[in-house]
Amino acid sequence: MKKKIILIIGLFFVLSSCSEDKDISLAPVAITLNFSHSWNGTEITSADFDQLKFTNENGQTLSIEKLRYLISEVSMTHESGVKTILDNYKLVDLENNESMSFQTSEAVLPGDYNSITFRFGFKEEDNIDGAYQDLNTANFNVPEPLGGGYHFMQFDGKYMNVSSIEAPFLYHVISAIDPTNVNDAIDTSFTINIGSATVGSNTNINIQMDVSEWFKNPNTWDLNEYDINLMGNYDVQLLMNQNGTSVFDLVSITQ
């Protein structure tokens, strides 16, 4: 009889312990996103700025002086089909290391997720002129004559032009403005699906932008033709939108 009582008590503690572990494992957790940058597989940091050390697909030598961009609608879709938006927006700036790594403001349950997505830029209904104080402070606004709202990316540098003279380029991505109606903006933001993930108690999702892709896929970019004054060029903004869809990749997921 005593043995039975001891066995029952022991089983109770085992089940209780398992239940507590299960409760802990099912507690919602925040996700950390880490953004890094490369040029054809070679890492880029702000230490590489202001150096004519990169060559684009068109054979032009160029430097990077500024690179910052907006992501929004970071979300994960569980294998059950439930989608959770983890963060509204973030400004990633290569000259600010803290901006390249952040923990999501919302949490998800541990488990298997079929997709991790984020939007490059703002969709039109969120791209409200003057609405975001931190972006205003960062001077990320688009001038009102060009539609207002915010940049999706500011990518500045210099390149050796056709006359072998160092010239500036301003690869600025915004909503495309119809030249016949500046009040009618075309949404050139786009959503990136970087794949699936298993979420644990301390999940880091490591994402990389291959900056060289902005100049080559699917449109080979000639900086002699498209270097500055691109924000008001409707056709060029559509080309940028096409090239942007291949720039981000999932590097790894660590726990």
Image: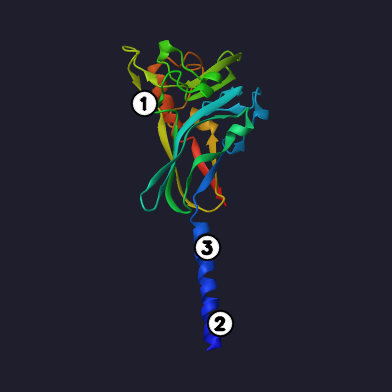
| The one of 97 and 223 positioned closer to us in this rendering | 97
For the point 49% across and 18% down, which residue is it? 141
Q: Is residue 78 visible?
A: yes
Name the element at disc 1: helix
Q: For residue 46, what is the image quadrant?
A: top right
Q: Quadrant of residue 175?
A: top left
Residue 44 visible in the snapshot: no
Q: Are marks 3 and 2 in contact (CB under 8 Å)?
A: no
Q: Which of labels 2 and 1 is toward the front?
A: 2
Q: Residues within 10 Å of mark 3 (few under 14, many from 20)?
A: few
Q: Amino acid at mark 1?
A: Glu
Q: Earlier in the sequence, mark 3 or mark 2?
A: 2
Q: For residue 6, which numbered disc appears in the image?
A: 2
Disc 2 element: helix
In terms of sequence position, does the residue under pointer 3 or pointer 1 come before the other? 3
Residue at 57% of width from left, 26% of height from top? 67
- Report the coloring of the rendering: rainbow
Decide: few, some or many residues near mark 2? Use Cα within 10 Å; few <14, some 14-19, many ≥20: few
Quickly name the residue at label 3: 20
The residue indicated by pointer 1 is 125
Which amino acid type is shown beneath numbered disc 2?
Ile
Whole-angstrom CA distance, mark 3 to mark 1, is 44 Å
